[in-house]
Image: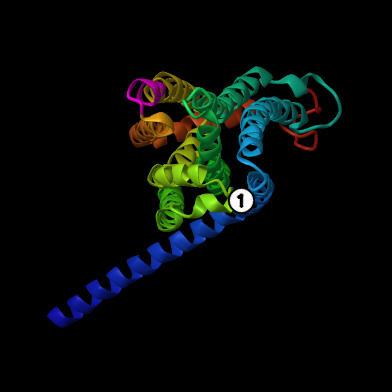
Amino acid sequence: MDNGMHEKLLGSEGKEVGDFKGRVYDESKKIWRVALPGIIARVASFGTIIVTQSFIGHISSVDLAGYALVQTLTVRFANGVLWFLLNLDISWEVGALEAWTGFSTAAFKDLLPVIKLSISSGIMVCLELWYNSILVLLAGYMSNAEVAISAFSICLNINGWEFMICLGFLGAACVRIANELGRGDAKATKFSINVLITTSVVIGVFFTILCLVFGHNIGYLFTNDVEVASTVSDLSLLLAISVLLNSIYPVLSGVAVGAGMQGTVAIINLCCFYLIGIPIGALLGYVAHLEVSGIWIGMNLGILTQSLALSYMAYKTDWDEQVKIAAERLQRWYLKSSEEPGNNGHA
């Protein structure tokens, strides 16, 4: 009898483990189905910037510094504006095209809340993109600005290239969290968050190890200048830490966006980046004379603070309550089609 009971317990435990593995596999498939196309597109697009910088860097360090200023300041600033406008455009399309049966006042039904969410998303992205641009400006006032800007931009672009992978998971987090909340499944929402963060962190650890192993020589891929390459080597440990942090906060940002908490994330970004990261970076760089390393330490502290704040927010969020909120939004924004009984196709 004892043996039979023992076998049943083992069988039950094995079934639970098998079910858990199956759930992880199914969730991973859903995540990668959303994340992979975005990752490929972003990595390929940002890769052109990396290759261009590599060619220019081997011409001269002055050209490398000039390219860094133009690419980091102008391109990132423009991308921030484009992201902001894209979010507004998406909000208009979502509001205007729901249950489209011809132009009517239904196209504007509850459009203002959607626009507010999209503006919050745009501000959130702009604050992140412009953060690095301001740090490059700070590097431009160092004693050896040419070397500082060149080395800082090389590390920043390497970090940005890996960050494109994390942006794919940010998009996947938005979709998966919104889907599960829309389905009314709080447990599935929390499970999806765990799988997303675990997957992203594993990838982040892999690239962190690569930065630690090849950090002392990676600068020579972008320049022949020994001083610039040496400065990149000095920043390699801080770069590895940044890559690891990259694997955490984008996913948490995506979780918040999927739950419609963009406004809160925008406030967190503003406080962590512009009230903590930049001031500390300026103090360490100029007052403590740590030069470009001080600026990067300040950047990492801002990102670390943001990651902790987002982690706390995700931990304290009542996901059952978020399910109710999502249901209320769906009910408020839902329009019956003209084919449904009791509806003449007008709002």
Rendering coords of residue 171 (x, y %):
58, 43
Question: Residue flagged by tag 1: what amino acid is it?
Answer: Ile
In this rendering, position of residue 300 left or right of residue 152: left
Q: In the image, what residue occupies the spot 75% across and 30% down?
A: 93
Report which residue position mark 1 lands on: 39
Q: Nearer the viewer, residue 290 or 78?
A: 290
Q: State the image coordinates of residue 13 (x, y, percent, origin top left).
A: 28, 69
Image label count: 1
Q: Give the magenta-colored segment's residue range.
A: 282-289
Decide which of 263, 329 is in the foreground and name it: 263
Is 14 on the left-hand or right-hand side of 258?
left
Q: Nearer the viewer, residue 155 or 163?
A: 155
Q: Name above or below for residue 74 compared with residue 21.
A: above
The local crowd at label 1, few if under 14, some if 14 to 19, many if 20 or more residues have their Cα within 10 Å, is many
- The answer to whether residue 115 is magenta is no
Quarter of the image containing the N terminus? bottom left
